[in-house]
Image (cartoon, rainbow, N blue to C red):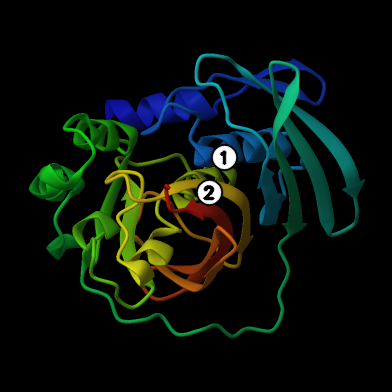
Amino acid sequence: MSPALADLLDLLDLEQIEQNIFRGSSRSAVVPRVFGGQVAAQALVAAGRTVPGDRTAHSLHSYFLRMGDPGAPIVYTVDRIRDGRSFTTRRVVAVQHGQPIFHLSASFQTYEEGLEHQAEMPAAPDPETLPRAEEMLPRYADRFVDASVVDRILEARAAVDLRYAGEPPFASVGSPREPRSQVWFRTAGKLADDPLLHVCLATYVSDMTLLDSVLLAHGRGGWTVGDVVGASLDHAMWFHRPFRADEWLLYDQESPSASGGRGLGQARIYTRDGRLAISVIQEGVVRVPR
Protein backbone atom coordinates (compact mmCIF):
# COMPACT_ATOMS: atom_id res chain seq x y z
CA MET A 1 0.00 0.00 0.00
CA SER A 2 1.31 3.43 -0.92
CA PRO A 3 1.72 6.04 1.85
CA ALA A 4 -0.85 8.22 0.04
CA LEU A 5 -3.45 5.43 0.14
CA ALA A 6 -2.73 4.82 3.82
CA ASP A 7 -3.32 8.54 4.45
CA LEU A 8 -6.60 8.40 2.51
CA LEU A 9 -7.81 5.41 4.54
CA ASP A 10 -6.98 7.35 7.71
CA LEU A 11 -9.01 10.25 6.32
CA LEU A 12 -12.01 7.95 5.85
CA ASP A 13 -11.68 6.39 9.31
CA LEU A 14 -14.04 8.77 11.11
CA GLU A 15 -14.03 9.36 14.85
CA GLN A 16 -17.34 8.58 16.56
CA ILE A 17 -18.00 11.32 19.09
CA GLU A 18 -21.60 10.42 20.01
CA GLN A 19 -24.27 8.03 18.84
CA ASN A 20 -24.99 8.94 15.19
CA ILE A 21 -22.36 11.72 15.24
CA PHE A 22 -18.95 11.38 13.62
CA ARG A 23 -16.02 13.70 13.04
CA GLY A 24 -13.60 13.63 10.13
CA SER A 25 -10.49 15.59 9.33
CA SER A 26 -10.17 17.39 6.04
CA ARG A 27 -7.43 18.52 3.76
CA SER A 28 -6.96 20.70 0.73
CA ALA A 29 -7.35 19.16 -2.70
CA VAL A 30 -6.14 20.52 -6.04
CA VAL A 31 -7.99 23.76 -5.32
CA PRO A 32 -7.99 25.47 -1.90
CA ARG A 33 -11.18 23.83 -0.67
CA VAL A 34 -12.21 20.39 0.51
CA PHE A 35 -12.48 17.92 -2.36
CA GLY A 36 -16.12 16.99 -2.91
CA GLY A 37 -15.33 13.30 -3.29
CA GLN A 38 -13.78 13.33 0.17
CA VAL A 39 -16.92 14.75 1.80
CA ALA A 40 -19.18 12.32 -0.09
CA ALA A 41 -17.03 9.33 0.88
CA GLN A 42 -16.81 10.37 4.53
CA ALA A 43 -20.57 10.91 4.70
CA LEU A 44 -21.12 7.43 3.27
CA VAL A 45 -18.73 6.01 5.88
CA ALA A 46 -20.77 7.70 8.61
CA ALA A 47 -24.02 6.33 7.21
CA GLY A 48 -22.59 2.85 6.76
CA ARG A 49 -21.40 2.62 10.35
CA THR A 50 -25.01 2.82 11.56
CA VAL A 51 -26.24 0.06 9.23
CA PRO A 52 -26.42 -3.70 9.98
CA GLY A 53 -23.42 -5.54 8.56
CA ASP A 54 -25.46 -7.71 6.18
CA ARG A 55 -26.59 -4.68 4.14
CA THR A 56 -24.55 -2.98 1.46
CA ALA A 57 -24.98 0.45 -0.14
CA HIS A 58 -27.04 0.36 -3.33
CA SER A 59 -27.54 4.09 -3.95
CA LEU A 60 -26.74 7.59 -2.78
CA HIS A 61 -28.07 11.04 -3.65
CA SER A 62 -26.27 14.16 -2.46
CA TYR A 63 -25.97 17.93 -2.70
CA PHE A 64 -22.89 20.10 -2.23
CA LEU A 65 -24.17 23.13 -0.32
CA ARG A 66 -21.11 25.19 0.62
CA MET A 67 -17.39 25.19 -0.04
CA GLY A 68 -15.56 23.09 2.57
CA ASP A 69 -12.74 24.55 4.67
CA PRO A 70 -9.70 22.23 4.50
CA GLY A 71 -8.38 23.72 7.75
CA ALA A 72 -11.32 22.62 9.91
CA PRO A 73 -12.82 19.25 10.91
CA ILE A 74 -16.17 18.15 9.48
CA VAL A 75 -18.95 16.83 11.73
CA TYR A 76 -21.33 14.26 10.24
CA THR A 77 -24.74 13.75 11.82
CA VAL A 78 -26.62 10.61 10.79
CA ASP A 79 -30.41 10.44 10.84
CA ARG A 80 -31.69 6.85 10.94
CA ILE A 81 -34.63 7.35 8.60
CA ARG A 82 -35.75 3.73 8.25
CA ASP A 83 -34.74 0.16 9.01
CA GLY A 84 -36.94 -2.18 6.98
CA ARG A 85 -36.81 -5.91 6.36
CA SER A 86 -34.73 -5.50 3.19
CA PHE A 87 -33.72 -1.83 2.99
CA THR A 88 -32.13 0.67 5.35
CA THR A 89 -32.19 4.43 4.68
CA ARG A 90 -29.89 7.03 6.21
CA ARG A 91 -29.61 10.80 5.90
CA VAL A 92 -26.31 12.54 6.67
CA VAL A 93 -25.59 16.25 7.09
CA ALA A 94 -21.96 17.44 7.06
CA VAL A 95 -21.33 20.59 9.10
CA GLN A 96 -18.42 23.03 9.36
CA HIS A 97 -18.37 26.28 11.33
CA GLY A 98 -21.99 25.71 12.34
CA GLN A 99 -23.28 25.50 8.76
CA PRO A 100 -24.20 22.51 6.58
CA ILE A 101 -21.82 22.06 3.66
CA PHE A 102 -23.11 18.74 2.28
CA HIS A 103 -26.25 16.59 2.42
CA LEU A 104 -26.43 12.87 1.66
CA SER A 105 -29.22 10.32 1.47
CA ALA A 106 -28.11 6.71 1.14
CA SER A 107 -29.91 3.40 0.92
CA PHE A 108 -28.60 -0.04 1.88
CA GLN A 109 -30.01 -3.46 1.01
CA THR A 110 -29.65 -7.09 2.03
CA TYR A 111 -28.51 -9.28 -0.87
CA GLU A 112 -31.23 -10.99 -2.88
CA GLU A 113 -31.60 -12.74 -6.23
CA GLY A 114 -33.51 -11.00 -9.02
CA LEU A 115 -33.74 -10.26 -12.74
CA GLU A 116 -30.41 -9.72 -14.49
CA HIS A 117 -29.37 -7.62 -17.48
CA GLN A 118 -26.88 -4.84 -18.11
CA ALA A 119 -25.54 -2.46 -20.75
CA GLU A 120 -22.56 -3.86 -22.62
CA MET A 121 -19.15 -2.55 -21.65
CA PRO A 122 -17.78 -0.15 -24.32
CA ALA A 123 -14.47 -0.68 -26.03
CA ALA A 124 -11.49 0.75 -24.17
CA PRO A 125 -7.72 0.34 -24.33
CA ASP A 126 -6.04 -1.94 -21.82
CA PRO A 127 -5.18 0.11 -18.71
CA GLU A 128 -1.67 -1.31 -18.56
CA THR A 129 -0.91 0.27 -21.96
CA LEU A 130 -1.86 3.79 -20.82
CA PRO A 131 0.54 6.29 -19.20
CA ARG A 132 0.39 6.90 -15.47
CA ALA A 133 -0.48 10.41 -14.27
CA GLU A 134 3.13 11.21 -13.35
CA GLU A 135 4.15 10.30 -16.91
CA MET A 136 1.33 12.16 -18.68
CA LEU A 137 0.75 15.39 -16.77
CA PRO A 138 4.24 16.93 -17.15
CA ARG A 139 3.76 16.86 -20.94
CA TYR A 140 1.10 19.56 -20.58
CA ALA A 141 2.69 21.67 -17.84
CA ASP A 142 2.94 24.70 -20.13
CA ARG A 143 -0.86 24.75 -20.57
CA PHE A 144 -1.73 25.12 -16.89
CA VAL A 145 -2.35 28.43 -15.13
CA ASP A 146 0.91 28.00 -13.20
CA ALA A 147 3.67 25.42 -12.82
CA SER A 148 2.46 24.24 -9.42
CA VAL A 149 -0.74 22.71 -10.84
CA VAL A 150 0.97 19.50 -11.96
CA ASP A 151 2.40 18.87 -8.49
CA ARG A 152 -0.95 19.64 -6.84
CA ILE A 153 -2.85 17.25 -9.11
CA LEU A 154 -0.30 14.48 -8.59
CA GLU A 155 -0.40 14.96 -4.82
CA ALA A 156 -4.21 15.00 -4.72
CA ARG A 157 -4.47 11.80 -6.78
CA ALA A 158 -1.49 9.92 -5.36
CA ALA A 159 -3.74 7.39 -3.59
CA VAL A 160 -5.30 6.40 -6.90
CA ASP A 161 -3.80 5.06 -10.12
CA LEU A 162 -5.95 6.94 -12.66
CA ARG A 163 -5.19 6.65 -16.36
CA TYR A 164 -6.88 8.59 -19.18
CA ALA A 165 -7.90 6.49 -22.18
CA GLY A 166 -7.77 9.60 -24.38
CA GLU A 167 -6.59 13.17 -24.15
CA PRO A 168 -7.85 15.00 -21.03
CA PRO A 169 -9.59 18.39 -21.36
CA PHE A 170 -6.45 20.40 -20.64
CA ALA A 171 -4.81 18.75 -23.67
CA SER A 172 -7.65 19.64 -26.06
CA VAL A 173 -8.14 23.36 -25.46
CA GLY A 174 -9.68 25.06 -28.48
CA SER A 175 -10.63 21.77 -30.13
CA PRO A 176 -14.20 20.71 -29.29
CA ARG A 177 -14.86 17.01 -29.67
CA GLU A 178 -17.32 14.32 -28.71
CA PRO A 179 -18.53 14.92 -25.11
CA ARG A 180 -17.21 11.62 -23.85
CA SER A 181 -14.19 10.56 -21.82
CA GLN A 182 -12.85 7.36 -20.32
CA VAL A 183 -10.47 6.70 -17.46
CA TRP A 184 -9.33 3.54 -15.77
CA PHE A 185 -8.74 3.68 -12.03
CA ARG A 186 -7.81 1.59 -9.01
CA THR A 187 -6.37 2.36 -5.60
CA ALA A 188 -2.59 2.47 -5.25
CA GLY A 189 -2.48 -0.71 -3.19
CA LYS A 190 -4.61 -3.57 -1.93
CA LEU A 191 -7.56 -3.01 0.38
CA ALA A 192 -9.32 -5.03 3.05
CA ASP A 193 -12.38 -7.01 1.98
CA ASP A 194 -14.95 -4.67 3.63
CA PRO A 195 -17.55 -3.90 0.87
CA LEU A 196 -18.33 -0.50 2.40
CA LEU A 197 -14.67 0.52 2.05
CA HIS A 198 -14.65 -0.28 -1.67
CA VAL A 199 -17.92 1.59 -2.24
CA CYS A 200 -16.61 4.64 -0.36
CA LEU A 201 -13.36 4.71 -2.32
CA ALA A 202 -15.24 4.46 -5.63
CA THR A 203 -17.38 7.37 -4.42
CA TYR A 204 -14.21 9.34 -3.64
CA VAL A 205 -12.79 8.81 -7.14
CA SER A 206 -16.11 9.38 -8.92
CA ASP A 207 -15.93 13.15 -8.32
CA MET A 208 -12.51 13.57 -9.95
CA THR A 209 -13.28 13.49 -13.68
CA LEU A 210 -17.03 13.22 -14.23
CA LEU A 211 -17.49 16.71 -15.70
CA ASP A 212 -14.53 16.34 -18.10
CA SER A 213 -16.89 15.43 -20.92
CA VAL A 214 -18.71 18.77 -20.52
CA LEU A 215 -15.42 20.57 -21.12
CA LEU A 216 -14.48 18.40 -24.10
CA ALA A 217 -17.68 19.34 -25.91
CA HIS A 218 -16.60 22.98 -25.89
CA GLY A 219 -12.83 22.70 -26.22
CA ARG A 220 -12.35 24.00 -22.69
CA GLY A 221 -9.57 22.95 -20.36
CA GLY A 222 -11.20 23.77 -17.03
CA TRP A 223 -9.85 25.67 -14.05
CA THR A 224 -6.34 24.28 -14.68
CA VAL A 225 -5.99 26.50 -17.75
CA GLY A 226 -8.24 29.25 -16.43
CA ASP A 227 -10.96 29.14 -19.08
CA VAL A 228 -13.74 27.69 -16.88
CA VAL A 229 -14.86 28.09 -13.27
CA GLY A 230 -16.53 24.98 -11.90
CA ALA A 231 -17.85 23.23 -8.80
CA SER A 232 -19.98 20.16 -8.10
CA LEU A 233 -23.64 20.79 -7.32
CA ASP A 234 -25.10 17.33 -6.81
CA HIS A 235 -24.00 13.73 -7.16
CA ALA A 236 -25.89 10.45 -7.40
CA MET A 237 -24.64 6.85 -7.61
CA TRP A 238 -26.23 3.41 -7.93
CA PHE A 239 -24.18 0.36 -6.99
CA HIS A 240 -25.39 -2.55 -9.08
CA ARG A 241 -22.91 -5.37 -8.57
CA PRO A 242 -20.00 -6.20 -6.25
CA PHE A 243 -16.60 -4.79 -7.22
CA ARG A 244 -13.21 -4.03 -5.73
CA ALA A 245 -11.78 -0.52 -5.84
CA ASP A 246 -8.25 -1.98 -5.77
CA GLU A 247 -8.82 -3.67 -9.14
CA TRP A 248 -9.14 -1.87 -12.47
CA LEU A 249 -12.46 -0.12 -13.09
CA LEU A 250 -13.42 1.62 -16.33
CA TYR A 251 -15.12 4.99 -15.82
CA ASP A 252 -17.01 5.67 -19.07
CA GLN A 253 -18.32 9.26 -18.95
CA GLU A 254 -20.41 11.49 -21.22
CA SER A 255 -22.29 14.78 -21.12
CA PRO A 256 -25.80 14.98 -22.62
CA SER A 257 -26.33 18.66 -21.81
CA ALA A 258 -24.86 21.97 -20.68
CA SER A 259 -26.96 25.12 -20.17
CA GLY A 260 -27.69 27.87 -17.68
CA GLY A 261 -24.14 27.87 -16.31
CA ARG A 262 -24.42 24.16 -15.46
CA GLY A 263 -23.15 20.99 -17.08
CA LEU A 264 -24.41 17.43 -16.65
CA GLY A 265 -22.21 14.37 -16.61
CA GLN A 266 -23.39 10.78 -16.58
CA ALA A 267 -21.29 7.65 -16.45
CA ARG A 268 -21.08 3.91 -16.02
CA ILE A 269 -18.31 2.13 -14.16
CA TYR A 270 -17.38 -1.38 -15.29
CA THR A 271 -15.12 -4.03 -13.84
CA ARG A 272 -12.28 -5.16 -16.06
CA ASP A 273 -14.19 -8.34 -16.97
CA GLY A 274 -17.18 -6.31 -18.23
CA ARG A 275 -19.65 -6.28 -15.33
CA LEU A 276 -21.59 -3.02 -14.88
CA ALA A 277 -20.79 -2.10 -11.27
CA ILE A 278 -21.95 1.51 -10.82
CA SER A 279 -24.00 4.22 -12.54
CA VAL A 280 -23.21 7.87 -11.77
CA ILE A 281 -24.83 11.23 -12.53
CA GLN A 282 -23.52 14.64 -11.51
CA GLU A 283 -24.35 18.26 -12.30
CA GLY A 284 -21.88 21.03 -11.73
CA VAL A 285 -21.44 24.75 -12.16
CA VAL A 286 -19.58 25.38 -15.41
CA ARG A 287 -19.05 29.09 -15.95
CA VAL A 288 -16.90 30.95 -18.44
CA PRO A 289 -14.99 33.80 -16.70
CA ARG A 290 -15.84 37.31 -17.91
Q: Nearer the viewer, residue 183 or 170?
A: 170
Residue 78 seen by the camera: yes
Judged from the image, the secondary structure of the residue bearing numbered disc 1 is helix
Residue 108, relative to residue 268: is it above or below? above
Q: Amino acid at mark 1?
A: Ala
Q: Amino acid at mark 2?
A: Thr
Judged from the image, the secondary structure of the residue bearing numbered disc 2 is helix
Q: CA distance from mark 2 to mark 1?
A: 6 Å
Q: Which residue is mark 2?
A: 203
Q: Residues within 10 Å of mark 2 (few under 14, many from 20)?
A: many
Q: Nearer the viewer, residue 116 or 94?
A: 94
**Residue 209 coordinates in the image, percent (x, y):** 40, 54
Identify the mark nearer the N-term, 2 or 1: 1
Task: Give the residue displayed 30% in from the left and 66% down from the top.
Answer: 219
**Residue 63 coordinates in the image, percent (x, y):** 68, 46
Residue 272 seen by the camera: no
* Quarter of the figure with residue 241: bottom right
The reply to whether dot 2 and dot 1 touch (C-beta < 8 Å) is: yes
Lateral position of residue 258 relative to residue 237, left or right:
left
Q: Which residue is mark 1?
A: 41
Lateral position of residue 165 relative to residue 107, left or right:
left
Task: Give the residue displayed 43% in from the left and 68% down from the top.
Answer: 253
